[in-house]
Amino acid sequence: MNFSLSSKAIATIKADCLVVGVPEKGDWPESTTHADEALDGLIKRLQTAGDITGKSASTGVFPLEGRPWSRLMVVGTGKDTDRSYAAFRKSVIAAVTALKDGPSRSALIALADTPVTGEEAVSSEEALLNLIGRTLEEQLYTFTQFKSDKPASRKLNKVIALASGNGKALKDAFNLGLATGRGMNFTRDLGNTPPNICHPIWLADQAKQMAKEYDCIKTEVLDEKQMEKMGMNTILAVGKGSTQPPRLIVMEYRGGKAKDKPYVLVGKGITFDTGGISLKPGEAMDEMKYDMGGSASVFGTMKVIAETRPKINVVAVVAAAENMPDGGASRPGDIVTTLSGQTVEILNTDAEGRLVLCDALTYVKKFDPEAVIDMATLTGACIIALGNHATGMLANNDDLANELLAAGERTGDRAWRLPLWDEYQSQLDSNFADMANIGGRPAGTITAACFLSRFAKDYRWAHLDIAGTAWLSGKAKGATGRPVPLLVDYLMSHAGK
């Protein structure tokens, strides 16, 4: 697919399909006015006749003759007063969806001058070009690697986005959006790959391949013998029941100054989660291949960083294991000593994500991090609390928490902060070890984060519970690529500072 940006006069850019926006109520964007002039008032006539309404995310396609374009697509953008960033995104998604299912081979999208309510960070032309670029990559995604009868290739192979100028800021915004979309799609590829292929060693191979593809990425992989020597007993405990050995995967990007502390991303990489001896119900267990969604989002974010090469230092750590039940698997009641020296009584082997993460959170202290963000499909309780719209976020630092929340708002990849109060810590009390790995049913997302917080006291830390946002179930089943947009926005906001 060929994506590009153009600031030429709209009537001089040839394409099979021209895409413009029309509001339900409000003033037309300049690009729509210019397009209407080139079409001798056709868009105004269609609106007057009721063929287009301007209702948010509505689309209409009309054939043209003797014009620079073979057809016209008008997408409704709603009322000026109600057009939030999220509402505009729905309109862009509707337009791209109609394009990918249509007959056009090329398209000119003239939507970046649509007025959007909110601060400049979400309403500027740069922000909207970023969104358009990301949405193009995201909505044109397919995953057909394992289909023997491959679907026919779509006709669309070239998209031009119209911009007001050809300045570096506009180009960079559009290109970052495209890169973010590609990072999301890499995350989705990893998540959608079946668990008989995607296991810890395979994930480690993807990190090694990334280092080969991008010379700015350095990869190190620790095997089970190295982890045992170091004392990473909780990662090893989770992987004991599987024939697939665990791995600790480390990827480093050093684009900032040598003295700059790195931002560290930590991902839960449970490539399949049966629950172990505490076996899960069989219904929808196939979706437990998505339990490595945290690690997949780390990979996707690092791909964006490698492509765009910002002036920042980033370290990514993935704790990868497969949670299976066999005669060697960990049992409820086992006590293990973590890398930190703290002991954990395993009361439920299905609370394994926090076990692999706690050793990783101890390990990353060696990097003297500026901040650590871990992401994990950690608790079903988070889905009950927040549904599938918001990522659960807990943190030991208010500034870090607020920056992540703001990044989520800017990208539409939203998070919601939950409390991390000391009052919840007592739910993890154990009669036999320093702590238990579960705190009971009440506040399950919070007590899981309380557990992790005991290993993250030496640095600024935030935990993203993406159990409800990393994948979709039902007819639209598949990985979403979240929270890559949030993470990329957060990291880019610190690049070069």
Image: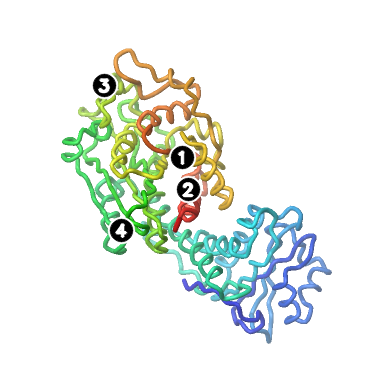
Q: Residue at x 49, y 41 (%)?
A: 400
Question: Are the residues flagged by discs 3 and 4 in contact, CB closer than 8 Å?
Answer: no
- How far apart are the two marked residues, 3 and 4, measured between alpha carbons? 37 Å
Question: Is tag 3's residue or tag 4's residue first in the polypeptide sequence?
Answer: 4
Q: Which mark is residue 464?
A: 1
Total tally of numbered discs in the picture: 4
Q: Which mark is residue 483?
A: 2
Question: Is tag 2's residue or tag 3's residue first in the polypeptide sequence?
Answer: 3
- Taking the view exactly as shown, the residue that stands out farthest to the top is 431
Q: Position of residue 67 (x, y in %)?
A: 67, 84
Residue with the mark numbered 4? 217
Q: Quadrant of residue 276?
A: top left
Question: Is tag 1's residue or tag 3's residue first in the polypeptide sequence?
Answer: 3
Question: Is tag 2's residue or tag 1's residue first in the polypeptide sequence?
Answer: 1
Residue 89 visible? The answer is no
- How far apart are the two marked residues, 2 and 3, measured between alpha carbons? 33 Å
